[in-house]
Amino acid sequence: MSTHTATRPAHAARPETPEREPRPRRFSLGQTLRRTPLRAAVALLLVIEIYPLVWLMLSSLKREDEFSLKPVWALPEGFDWANYSEAWTTGNMSGYLRNSLLATVPSLAAIIVFGVAAGFALQVMVWRGRNTVLLAFLGGIMVPMQMVLLPLFTIYFKAQLINSLWSLIITYTAFGLPLTVFLMAGYFRAIPPEVLEASFLDGAGIFRTFATVVLPMVRNAILTIALVQFFFIWNDLLLSLTFISDDSLRTVQTGLLNFVGQYGQRQWGPTFASICLTVVPTLLLYLALNQKVMKGLTAGSVKG
Amino acid sequence: MRSMLGDKRAIAVFVGPALLVYTLVMIVPIVWSLGYTFFDGSVIGGFTYTGLDNYRQLLDDQAFWDSTWFTVKYGAAVTIGQVGFGLLLALLYTFYLKRASALVRTLAFFPVVLPTVAVAAMFTKLFAVAPQPGLVNSIASMLGLSGDRDWFADSGSAFIVLVLMDVWRSMGFYAVLLYAGLVDIPDDIVEGARLDGAQGWRLVRHIILPMLTPILLSSVIFSINGTLKVFDSIMALTGGGPGDTTSPLTLYMYKTAFSFGDYGYGSTIAMQLTLLSLLVTLMIFRYSRKDQNR
């Protein structure tokens, strides 16, 4: 081990491998006291960020009379899964989840395919007017949804797409494109021209180069963007509230809003269970891809 | 090389689909929406041309000015909360937790990924008073404070819960963004400043913050643009109530268009919202430019 650390002075100045002088470790009372407020701050932070979620999940397992008889922070007496079956069937959360999946997956695929290709052409390829087009996409990041909501409602109404998941898929795709194009253009900037040149010299055409050389280089970037867009689409309320009024076609968010509106006051158990049903999938997805999210967010994607 | 990258057919294939969808679903509707501002009516009831009436109506409409004021107030409060607490967390990650911060970062990021409606439903229960007190009221009564406060009955306390919720939801996000910026500050600069005697707040104020300015600026712009357009949180938590006292421009526009069937006036309000976000963004740019020249 020691020889290994000794033989890497080349990039010692980088933050990852700081070779500072080892500080003498002292455990004085003063230092402990000075550290205590910070420790308390971290503990408080974790309680504030996590405890509501824990409370939510514990509450979803309580029987209805436990809410009125015992303090709200009491642990559940048993695991009462009835709340979940109530939310799943009577509350129709199963249908809402299916609709959300049916709307999210196609839009996500379209955003990635269209957005990545457009980002490549706008950043790497050479043509007149590409700056104008890039600017047009950029402007879309600023435009509030409210600005296009009414004309879109008119169009979908005339085309009989209201109360069809297609209206959502089309709109999500268009709204996901600006950020995707913008971020992808940033990632493509980092690809050295020599790589493309080598591929062309090998006789590969532009499409082949894009598919076999360029795409593998930005795989992580695509995953990050897909994840960001997933949360944006999955959590959308405004569009699904506007374009879908048929209860059997509602997505998770409008379905939950509806469910909470109907049962929220009287039946706490099923309400908590239905909230959990929408929270847990996103949390699991995030935990599974957490490393990638953090890397993507900290990789300079937003710093431009 | 040049001819390969200038292949018109390939460019069309790459950009075409995205540009087509984007033009049809974003650009055309924006222009269309501007057209609506000169009309009254809806797609169901039909439209009548009214010239500049919608703009005249705007000037005398107390509800519009109330929503505008609420939007600005809310945007300012939440942006300061999100970026401020985000910065504090980022400093905590970088200078106290150091490499052990990964777990805390992950946990503090949890609320970011949760659906707004679910978070709002949870906050409704946290601050509930009937049929049984929620967590906040229970803790309050345990501490000897009044435990039967109806947080959503009064516009002031409803506003507080709204701001708390949106700060709780996204400070972990801004913390990670700013943490990325802090990690990029070269170690020797911080060490050098320490050797020169800069400690604690002075180190942050004179060394760290100036170096963090670009990313702090993007965070503020990102945050204010999101919060001025807030819809989900308020729709799901208070629905604009009590009365219309927590109704931002987005909600007012939504009600105008879909409850009262007035697309023309709704589009006029939406346009003011767009102008407001543009104006605020430009102001922040201006201010930061001036700040750097000083």
Image (cartoon, rainbow, N blue to C red):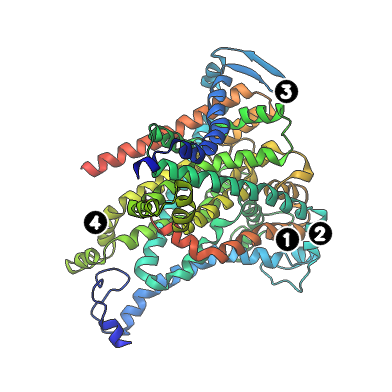
Q: Are marks 4 and 1 in contact (CB under 8 Å)?
A: no
Dot 3: what SS? loop
Residue B274 vertical placement versus B118 (above, below): above
Residue name at image x 39 percent, y 50 percent? A200
Dot 2: what SS? helix
Q: Position of residue A186 (x, y in %)?
A: 40, 48
Which of labels 3 and 1 is toward the front? 3
Report the residue marked by disc 3: B44
Q: Residues within 10 Å of mark 3 (few under 14, many from 20)?
A: few
Q: Position of residue B184 (x, y in %)?
A: 32, 60
| Residue A81 lies in quadrant | bottom right
Q: Chain of mark 3?
A: B
Query: Can residue B38 be seen in this snapshot?
Result: yes
Q: Which mark is residue A86?
A: 2
Q: Which mark is residue B206?
A: 4
Report the residue marked by disc 1: A273
